[in-house]
Amino acid sequence: MAVGAKKVVLEFEKPLAALEERLEALRAGATEGDAVAAAEVAAREEELERRRAEIYANLTAWDRVLLARHPDRPYTMDYVRRFIERPLEFHGDRLFRDDQAIVCGVGWFRGRKLVWIGHEKGRKTADKIAHNFGSPHPEGYRKALRMMRLADKFGLPVISFLDTAGAYPGIGAEERGQAEAIARNVLEMFNLRVPFVVAVIGEGGSGGAFGIGVGNRVLMQEYAYYSVISPEGCAAILWRDRAYAPQAAAAMKITAQDLMNLGVIDEIVAEPAYGAHRDYDLAAELLADALERHLAELEKMSRDTLREDRRKKFLAMGFFEEGGKGDGD
């Protein structure tokens, strides 16, 4: 959990919060050397762990959405600071301004020079406003494209961190060509001839995520989600009521397990027990190991093969076979 952050209790964690309160009361009232109190504390700790494991083993799609949005969950810069050496951030799209909803730069990752790109939501109120809560404007995508072109020019691998509710839908963003900026990025990402690994680390929201997400490999953390629209948006369209968001989340197949089964992602990256927000360092280590493994595989490919590999990956999505037909059907 972020240092100094107030503990956030998600809806499905409320039974655990009650158990934790009783446990803390027992600990506070226990005196040193009191065997009876020590035994009671141990029993409560065991009960809490058993109940927590039970709840997390049966999370719904909506529960996972809540975890992906957890305010203490590590963001792009939390990972960059942990496993990118000598990170040098680049600013601006050279056309309009610097959009801090997307951060990007160059650095060293386990012995290799590369380009890193990602959405950044910001932690404190002022930071959230500065980063527009992680929802990019067109200039954010154009800044990312500037970095991708630099990577292609100098033969540098790219890693991209996806964590946005979606691209900013305001009037100004639309006037400056939001749809064109995302579409341009998608087109040019398909033509890059360098290793490109994407990691969904929180919310993978619609075109806002896809605008920096066309990689040779797409990884997804265990409690992240990846979707064409938010569950609330889907519920508003289908049921005309955002209260149906949990049902929409289940129907949309947006969890890591669902997307792995559908062939949309290439690997589910494990998180620390009960969520990445509980141990930033371990979450970063697990993610870095997965990124390195896929980069090592892709670096064996020629530049032209990398481009074709990426195109084939995405063109193969959406094909399926219907089963269960009887004779004569």
Image (cartoon, helix red, strand yellow):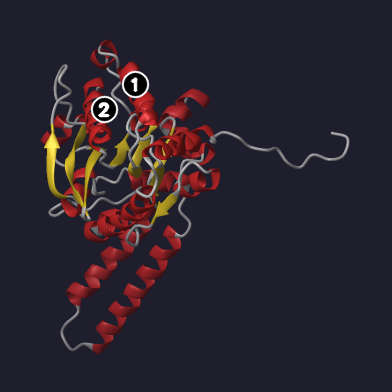
Q: Position of residue 138 (x, y in %)?
A: 26, 21
Who is closer to the viewer here, 61 or 201? Answer: 201
Q: Residue at x 26, y 54 (%)?
A: 277
The answer to which quarter of the image holds residue 304 is top left
Who is closer to the viewer here, 207 or 33? Answer: 207
Tell me whether circle 1 and circle 2 mark residues in contact (CB < 8 Å): yes
Considering the numbered disc 2 on the image, is that residue within a helix, a strand or a loop? helix
Amino acid, disc 2: Leu
Q: Residue at x 37, y 26 (%)?
A: 186
- The Cα–Cα distance between marks 1 and 2, rounded to whole angstroms, is 9 Å
Q: Determine crowd level at label 1: few under 14, some 14-19, many 20+ residues with C-alpha closer than 10 A.
A: some
Earlier in the chain: of badge 1 and badge 2, it is: 2
Residue beneath disc 2: 145
Which residue of the protein is positioned furthest toward the right in this rendering?
A: 328
Who is closer to the viewer here, 236 or 130? Answer: 130
Considering the numbered disc 1 on the image, is that residue within a helix, a strand or a loop? helix
Q: Position of residue 281 (x, y in %)?
A: 22, 59
Who is closer to the viewer here, 227 or 23? Answer: 227
Residue beneath disc 1: 184
